[in-house]
Image (spheres, grey):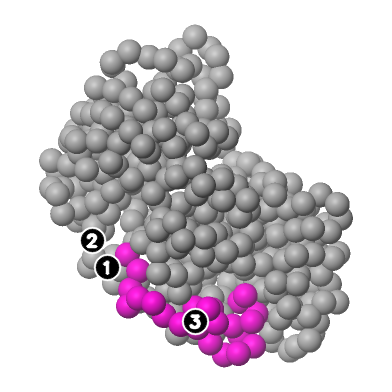
Amino acid sequence: MKITAIETQVCHARMRNWIFVKVLTDQSGLWGWGEATLEWHTRSVVGAIEDISQLLVGEDPRRIEHLWQMMYRQHFWHGNGIVRGTAMSGIDIALWDILGKVHGVPCHQLWGGRVRDFVRLYCHLGGGKMEDFYETKCEDAKRFGELAHCAVAEGFTAFKSMAVPETAPIEGLQPLRYAEACIKAMREAVGDSVDIMVDCHARPSPRMGLQFAKALEPYGLYFLEEPCWPETMEDIALIQRSVKTPIATGERLVGIHAFRELFEKRAASVIQPDITHCGGLTEARRIAGMAEAYRVALAPHNPQGPVSTAASLELGFATPSYVICESVHNDVPWRQDVVTEGFVVEKKGRIVFPNQRPGLGIEINEGEVKKHPFQQETLQRSFHKDGSVGDW
Ligand SMILES: [Mg+2]
């Protein structure tokens, strides 16, 4: 069995371009689907996949670890940067899809079988329409309460919001009071039985991140995400030591070595590797194994397209420390035209039952993909009040 070609198919899905990766083989009807979506870097990733594919064409797709080592180590530059990491992740996911199809079992069966009966989903407030949400500036905490109420009405028992405003490296009380008011409104809207997460998008400085973490501690967040830049783990570790709220991070980290540092510094209680960036399912499973040793929970980053979600769920059904799956369920109305999925979502409670189909259980309708060709992602620039550059 040999790989004959690796193709990319770009599908513009409003906020981002989904990059689907198709690994073809010399066996009739046998191919695998992966995803390598990386916002604002679509052309770079498509090019990187073309470069890496030269290493793999003609190789046996079932030798996944061997091929992963080739993708990571060969051609001198290691696969620890975001573009190459994303490219090899997309290919790796497709190889696991192929292996599941070869053996006629879902991927989670390949990894030791099912460790849970269902996986819980969480949503973003605004139902995936986050750019609309930002445009409102949402200066009214009441709106957070209303959106929280809507999420619960849609069946979710957990949701995430971006209720922490952008701040300069040091600011006074106003942004802290604003964030507190927003979280208070959400908590009052949904009560204690619903889990609330807050994503800081790594925009605060370490000291502002610490202040936000302290201010929001009384509201019992399920986790507080990226309270400051991931470049310095000591800063995140200091915040985690200072509050009982679980701190989550990891969506921008590539490879097991970055996560090793995070674990060694006890920087987070929840890790969020992105399976389409961190090195694919192969590396995500290694990271999950290391997380097990530190009793750290796993909640992979997954705002992208349907293959990423299928990969996250397969991992979740085979990984004990996996606690919840991020879902963007309402980003484009034609999502179900592009993909058929093997898993089943129960609307009440928003839980997912396992895929029974081989591999990732997913098929992409290539004709539908062609209806949504590449479009440049909307420019997202952020500046502080004085005109200096902020983080988006
Ligand atoms: Mg995030």
Question: Distance of mark 3 from mark 1, alpha carbons?
Answer: 28 Å
Amino acid type at image mark 1: Lys
Q: Of the numbered discs in the image, which one, if any, rests on residue 155? A: 2
Report the amino acid beneath label 2: Gly
Camera sees residue 73: yes
In the rendered structure, the answer to whether residue 150 lies left or right of residue 133 reads: left
- The disc at residue 347 is 1
Q: Which residues are magenta?
A: 96-120
Is residue 100 one of those drawn in magenta? yes
The percent coordinates of residue 341 (x first, y second) are 47, 74
Q: Nearer the viewer, residue 19 or 178?
A: 178
Q: Residue at x 39, y 28 (%)?
A: 209
Q: Which mark is residue 296?
A: none
Which mark sits nearer the N-terminus, 1 or 2? 2
The residue that mark 3 highlights is 112
Q: Secondary structure at mark 3?
A: loop
| Label whose residue precedes the other's in the sequence (2 or 3) | 3
**Height in image: 213 above or below 376?**
above
Residue 58 is situated, as x and y percent measured from the top left of the image, at: 85, 77
